[in-house]
Amino acid sequence: MYPVSSAFLQAVQENTRKYYWTGRITIKNGVVYEFGAEDIVKGSGYISSQCCGSTEIELGTVYAAEMGVTLLSDIDRYTLEDALVELFYHLRISKSLDSSELDPDYNQAVEADGIYETIPMGVFEVSEANRTVKCLELKAYDYMLRFEKDFNGFETVGKAYDFIHLCCEACHVEFALTQEEVEAMPNGDTGLSIYTDNDIETYRDVLYYVGQVLGGFFCINREGVLELRKYGDTPVMEIAGRHRFSSSFSDFITRYTAVSSTNMRTEIAEYYHLDPDNGLTMNLGVNPLLQFGLDETRRQLCENILNDISVIDYVPFDSDTIGNPALDIGDVLTFVGGQADEDKISAITSMQVNLYGKQRLKGVGKNPRLAQAKSKNDKNISGLLSQIEAGKIGIHTFTNASAFTVADQDTRIISIEFATSEDNHAQFFGQVIVDVDADPVTRTATAAGDVVIPAVNVDAIPEENVSAGSENEGEEPASEDELAVIGITEEQTVNVSLPVSWTEDGTAVVTFTFEFNDEMITVHQPVETWHSGKHTILLYYPIENVLANYTNTFNVYMRVSGGTGTVDTGWCVASVSGQSMGANAAWDGTITVEDYIERVGISGGLRLKSISENIVFEIDELVQRSYSDVVRGRTALGAFAMPVDVNGSNS
């Protein structure tokens, strides 16, 4: 529920109340058109929103809210393309005209007939504007449609916040939560990666799968900011029978006690449940973010999702009410009076607010008794995996989900895993934007040049001035006309040199190194010398001798000498393409370490063999981290012997 004062909650439930609607239209060039209650055609305005489908509760949903209104306005409809429409609801909470009664924590103001509290109802972008003789019909949607941009199936690595931040940056939408708030959620601090073979087409699809992992759903709030919400069990208000025009309630309670998620590596829909398992099963389908990692990590992710949805204990309902515009999608309610059960709770999964009309609230859900058999059968259905036919061109793509700064050490900036069904060749293409900060350089030099002293006239001194001496002090000197020129000095040239120094922007040498299947490629290493600023480089390398049915890894490392280079989120775009390429089983987190020592002879006693090893552990992510350990000392191998008498051995 949108934060409102207690006076608002009391006034909105009164038998009679006074309120009005206003709005604002902002077109692209910044011109603002305000409209009030007198400009809105009665019965025309509505705001419709939802977080689930029409039959059951869903996770990760990314539904857009819709707004429609008809105005008595002469605004040119051709200027309204992508214009913003904001709606506001004003409710009188008191008849007092005393400004000292205003609550500074809420948007309240004294008007002619009392104190009104104003709440925003959303920000929408116009998608359709139709003109009649006197009216202007508008239909608009919130910012969720901005995420309908091609994602291109980039293979990215990061935490949940990194994926959300990447989507918001690419689609120009703010996110309501901080990184700390997201990482504090279950699964929020777990590293995730998009499985290569996926059905992701847009950034909206990415948000859908991230919302599943976090156990919630996404929506655009009233300020036009992306927000992650979760289902809860704490009611925000009570709706009495006198506040409802009509209502219907189901005779069952929707509960979830299990989740099912298809593992693409094993091609099995894995099933995780609570005890007792007597409720519905939330089918997560094939989530590309739940395919990597150890089996235990996958289990923990799914169990955390199960814990989030286990609070769902809702009675499905459908009701027309007098309306409370402060309610939001996902709010939990209690109903009293009539056929309602006061001890049960319900959640709003869809809502339609009619301007100057009724508010329709709806909560959906399945019957556990009817869906139980189907849910239990779903857990045994294997996931269907799409395979790429031999000979067809395939492509594996990548982008970075985290920003990083590179200095004079090799830092991995691109990593792509791929496989082919037959021995083949492939091509690597990449583009990297680097913001270079070169070290300043101090320059010294000697400024040399010739200084010319010109020739000048030498004037004679009058004799009377010489003889008079001090007696003529105070008298005016002889004029220039009275002076006689007795000679000219010789022009002279003097050579002068001075040391000078200054500081200027230096150059940074940026080196890119390719690595294929743990082998550095030394024959081709692109190098660029750049001054400070943003630069773009295109990378290419033909990959030879690609082994069939083997997970191949192509890495790109970057090193900067003479400065640093920053690669922001989304500045690395790369792909590997070739024939007969298909999705391969991803690394499941198992690290196999093998070591070999020479054979140990046992004749004449056991010899000890010293073992020294340097173990390096690398985390599968784009942020450079390392762990090293040194094992020293002597490892002893021993045995024991015992004489055994065997019949016939001493004869």
Image: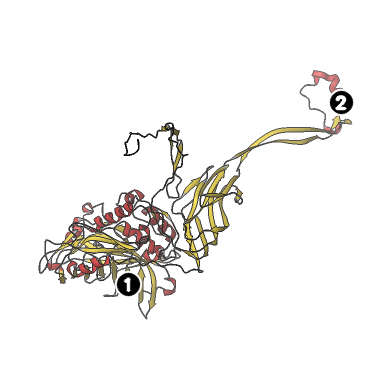
Give amino acid for label 1: Gly
**SS state under label 2:** loop
Q: CA distance from mark 2 to mark 1?
A: 106 Å
Asked where in the image residue 246 lies, by quadrant, the reply is: bottom left
Q: Is 596 displayed left or right of 528 in the figure?
A: left
Q: Label 2 crowding class (10 Å Cα cut-off): few <14, some 14-19, many 20+?
A: few
Residue designated by label 2: 462
Q: Are the residues tagged 2 and 1 within 8 Å (C-beta)? A: no
Q: Is 290 displayed left or right of 230 in the figure?
A: right
Asked where in the image residue 448 lies, by quadrant, the reply is: top right
Q: Is residue 114 visible?
A: no
**SS state under label 1:** strand
Q: Position of residue 315 (x, y in %)?
A: 17, 65
**Viewer-proximal residue, 270 or 409?**
270
Q: Position of residue 607 (x, y in %)?
A: 44, 32
Residue at far left of view: 338
The answer to whether residue 82 is above or below residue 96 is below
Residue designated by label 1: 68
Q: Residue at x 32, y 63 (%)?
A: 268
